[in-house]
Image (cartoon, helix red, strand yellow):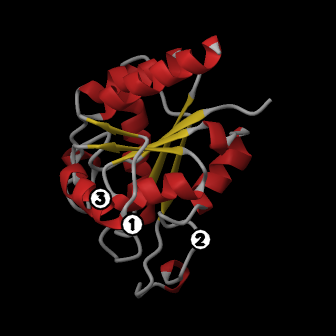
């Protein structure tokens, strides 16, 4: 049976957006993120990070260092008795000096590639899933995989809200932060199960 997931952007949603972090030491996780991910798992949903990391293609961070950041990020959540079901990233940058990263890919948000891969790996029904993020491309990614797109007002959320209004794109919900978004999802899930 296919599962439901909450796809979550990383920078600006789970942790503060500091540009292109090259080591875990500059990752600053929002304190509410631990509770939010716990609530996702307690609700029987998968928690999956979906993140554009063009810093790899731009030569600002080596891919192995990015993977190390993600290992340490997951370890930090494990110390809070929770973990992610998957972490998917796009390292590509169309003007990369390194050939393997220089391409127009299908995985860079808002393209649906990472969502499709996660759906295949983890048996996810994207049409009954959710996408939480602070940028326009996060919400467009949600729309492109047929998941409910939720905007958080942390990170670039406030400026993204204006851009989405200009484009006539209506999020399923506008949340104060990741925890608020998750609490809204849980309400939707309870409504759906009582129907």
Nearest the viewer among 102 and 152 is 152
Residue labelled with disc 1: 62
Tell which circle, 3 or 2, labels the residue nearer the N-terminal end: 2
Residue labelled with disc 3: 165
State the image coordinates of residue 105 (x, y, percent, origin top left): 56, 75
At 80% across and 29% down in the image, what residue appears? Answer: 1
Dot 3: element: helix
Dot 2: element: loop
Residue found at the very far right of the displayed protein: 1
Nearest the viewer among 144 and 98 is 144
State the image coordinates of residue 194 (x, y, percent, origin top left): 62, 11
Q: Residues within 10 Å of mark 2 (few under 14, many from 20)?
A: some
Would you say 150 lies left or right of 106 here? left
Q: CA distance from mark 3 to mark 2?
A: 26 Å
User: Against 44, is 10 above or below?
Assistant: below
Q: Nearer the viewer, mark 1 or mark 3?
A: 3
Q: Nearer the viewer, mark 3 or mark 2?
A: 3
Residue labelled with disc 2: 106
At 46% across and 59% down in the image, what residue appears? Answer: 140
Q: Quadrant of the C terminus?
A: top right
State if disc 3 and disc 1 touch (CB < 8 Å): no
Q: Which image quarter: residue 179? A: top left
Would you say 151 lies left or right of 155 here? right
Q: CA distance from mark 2 to mark 1?
A: 21 Å
């Amino acid at each position: 049976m296919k599962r439901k997931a909450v796809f979550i952007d990383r920078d600006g949603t789970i942790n503060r957006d500091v540009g292109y972090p090259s080591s875990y030491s500059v990752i600053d996780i929002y304190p509410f993120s631990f509770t939010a991910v716990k609530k996702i798992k307690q609700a029987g949903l998968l928690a999956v990070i979906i993140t554009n990391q063009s810093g790899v293609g731009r030569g600002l961070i080596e891919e192995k260092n990015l993977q190390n950041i993600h290992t340490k990020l997951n370890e930090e959540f494990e110390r809070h008795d929770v973990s992610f079901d998957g972490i998917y990233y796009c390292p590509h940058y169309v003007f990369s000096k390194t050939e393997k990263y220089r391409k127009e890919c299908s995985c860079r948000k808002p393209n649906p590639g990472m969502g499709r891969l996660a759906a295949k790996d983890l048996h996810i029904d994207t049409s009954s899933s959710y996408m939480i993020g602070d940028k326009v491309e996060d919400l467009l990614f949600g729309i492109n995989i047929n998941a409910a797109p939720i905007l958080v007002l942390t990170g670039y959320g406030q400026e993204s809200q204006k851009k989405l209004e200009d484009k006539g794109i209506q999020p399923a919900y506008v949340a104060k932060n990741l925890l608020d978004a998750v609490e809204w999802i849980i309400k939707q899930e309870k409504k759906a199960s009582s129907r």
